[in-house]
Amino acid sequence: MATEVSQEKAQGLQQQHEYNDDKSSLEKGPPEGFQTGKDGEDIPWTAKRMIAVLSLCIVYVGSQIILYFTSSALAPISQSLGTTRGNWMLTANTLAVAAICPFVGYITDLMGRRNIALIGTLFLLTSCAVQATANSLAQAVSAQAIGGLGAGMAELVALAGVAEITPARWRGVTLSLVTFSIVPFMPQLLYTILIVRSSTWRYCFLLCGLWNLVGMVGLVFCYKPPPRPNAEGLTKMQILARIDWVGAFLSIVGITLFLVGLQAGGYPHPWTSAPVLGPLIVGAITTFVAFPLWEVYGKHPFPMVPGKIFKGQRVVALAYVIVFIAGMEFYSILGFFPLVLQYVYNTDAITIGVRGLCYPWAILGGACIVSFLMSYTKGHVRTMFFTVAAIMTAFTGALVVSNPNNPGTTITLATLAAFGNGALVVPALTLAFYAAPDEFIGTVGALSLSVRFVGGSIGTSIFFNIFLTRFTRFLPEFVGAAAVQSGVTDEQTIIAIITAYASQVPGAAAAIEGISASTVAATQYASQMAYSEALKMVWYATIPFGVVSCIACAFLPNIRQLMTSKVAVDIH
């Protein structure tokens, strides 16, 4: 009977006009198990609560900076380790995050967040130590895999933990503050350049380790949420018996194989080769067929993806669509705009670092501003989300006008595109938290992160192959023509010049014996044009995906009835 009544209420809510204030819903007291102040007022912000939130913010940042420093220092790290396959460090990290996230969210909702947060932070500290002392690619890849596991745990617990210890109507504000906590590391590209120039890249990871250590100390002393209601009164064996082990296996193995196949496709293996098709097909079937079938028809009493998170509203499902597309665009900006700064414009390292501040600051600004404003919109989120999706789509596509002669225009467009992207990729997660059943906040957050990473990996694979196909055609064509026009007639010299620019080693062409300064200048400009032209199709390819995000945003409902003063858990 109770189930029928709750279903009727959910259907009634869904059928209301989107601008109905739903006063009766807001006047009701909070559900059992939630904490509020007197007369529905917000509970007080004690020193312990504030330190707990601050520590979660520190851990949130610490979960990301390992990957950021690895990316910005990839060339010196690879050179130090004597490898040309340094990109597998980045792949190992993102694979681990995407694979572990769904399982971690499920476990934290079942067993609690504190221990998972501490284990994740310990993994991050271990990753920093192993990476800082690595002497081989195998050690570095292992460090990044450990760091990815820790990042998946720490980032999820930080987001879900802050969301559930703050009043529901202020989740937008507090999650914007979590995102804003990355500010100390916004100039990490400059940090990397300065650290590498003055000493060694290894100190980057010492810095990461110290940062995570501070967060861990705060968690130990101040972050003490109560046991999860799902697990109260249960023994450890009973909790373990509740875990959906089949679902965990299918999700982890499926996502891992699928992303390995995507990452290997095109480079270093052809798309039609067995090392690509094998994991790609098996991973796709496991992730997109076997796992959903198990979750729907497996009859497990505690599935990894509970149907309850989608029931009675469309907010969570639409948020996942938006996060997926925003993840694709997010990684296109992170992955390809640095190429613009470094290879379309021939400047010194410090100038590259300063220009490189534009898009991370814009991403941060968009994420914080829109998340913050969500708490003041009275639930009218559709127009705001549609607007920022349109900004992201329009200005990312507009980067097709980028060329070696217009750095100002390019940086302006990239800044606006990044603002729109940041205003989607994080606020969409916040949107999902508003609609999430409180006992499944961790699960909803984990699925959001996994969707973002899978979207990012698919986008990176698509965009990289578009870029590589065009670049391998344009570089020899443009540089070879420029070399001939500048007076070079020897075929071997022309090949050497093309190879020098393909190596991406600064000054490699100038070091070739027998070529003049005018030839270097002409071929340098030609290589810049080759990058510019190859990247144009990448920016064009982002437009259809952006349009899909706009359509999803257009169907978002009013969420005012979800914006209450309830707090999912209190801290002790």
Image: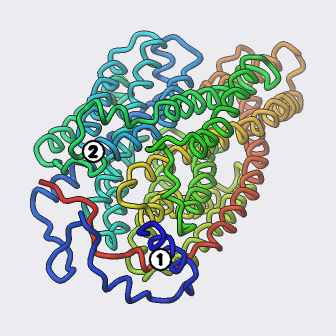
Asked if residue 35 is positioned above or below residue 446 in the image, the reply reads below
Q: Amino acid at mark 2?
A: Ala
* Position of residue 108 in the picture relative to residue 305 (left or right): left
The residue positioned 47% from the left and 58% from the top of the image is 429
Q: Secondary structure at mark 1?
A: helix
* Position of residue 278 in the picture relative to residue 417 (left or right): right
* Position of residue 547 in the picture relative to residue 127 (left or right): right
Classed neighbour count for the residue bearing mark 1: other residues with Cα under 10 Å, few (<14), some (14–19), many (≥20): few
Residue 231: which disc?
A: 2
> Residue 385 appears at what percent x and percent y?
56, 71
The residue positioned 32% from the left and 31% from the top of the image is 124
Residue furthest to the front: 1
2 or 1: tag closer to the N-terminus: 1
Q: Is residue 432 or residue 149 the one in the foreground? A: 432
The residue positioned 71% from the left and 28% from the top of the image is 280
Asked if residue 344 is positioned above or below residue 206 in the image, the reply reads below
